[in-house]
Amino acid sequence: MAKYIKIKGKTPNGGDYSEIYFFDDKGNPIDQKNASRCVIRECKENGELLKETFATCE
């Protein structure tokens, strides 16, 4: 599984792609299937960050 995924396509806040990073309870990068937390980043094509959302994973 992946510790990070990139999704190309328009985001709700006007980005061109989104990235999702997966973490354990201690903030260490971990595979998606074992993650308890994640950070979702919405970015413009040039890499400019538009919005960052912190969430818990089920």
Image: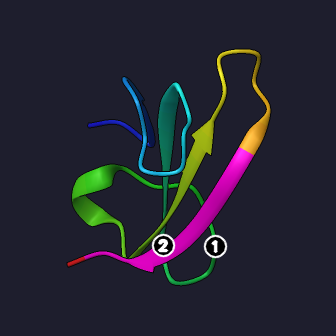
Q: Amino acid at mark 1?
A: Gly
Categorize mark 2 by other alpha carbons within 10 Å: few (<14), some (14-19), many (20+).
some
Does residue 27 sit above or below 23 in this rendering? Answer: below
On the image, the x and y values in percent for residue 30 come to 45, 55
Does residue 8 sit above or below 31 in this rendering? Answer: above
Q: Residue furthest front?
A: 14
On the image, the x and y values in percent for residue 20 come to 46, 47
Q: Residue furthest top?
A: 46
Which span of residues is magenta-colored?
Answer: 50-57
Residue drawn where x is 55% and y is 74% of the image: 54
| Residue position marked by numbered label 2 in the rendering | 24
Q: Nearer the viewer, residue 38 or 17?
A: 17
On the image, the x and y values in percent for residue 10 come to 40, 30
Q: Amino acid at mark 2?
A: Asp
User: Which secondary structure class fits the magenta region best?
Assistant: strand
For residue 2, which quarter of the picture? top left
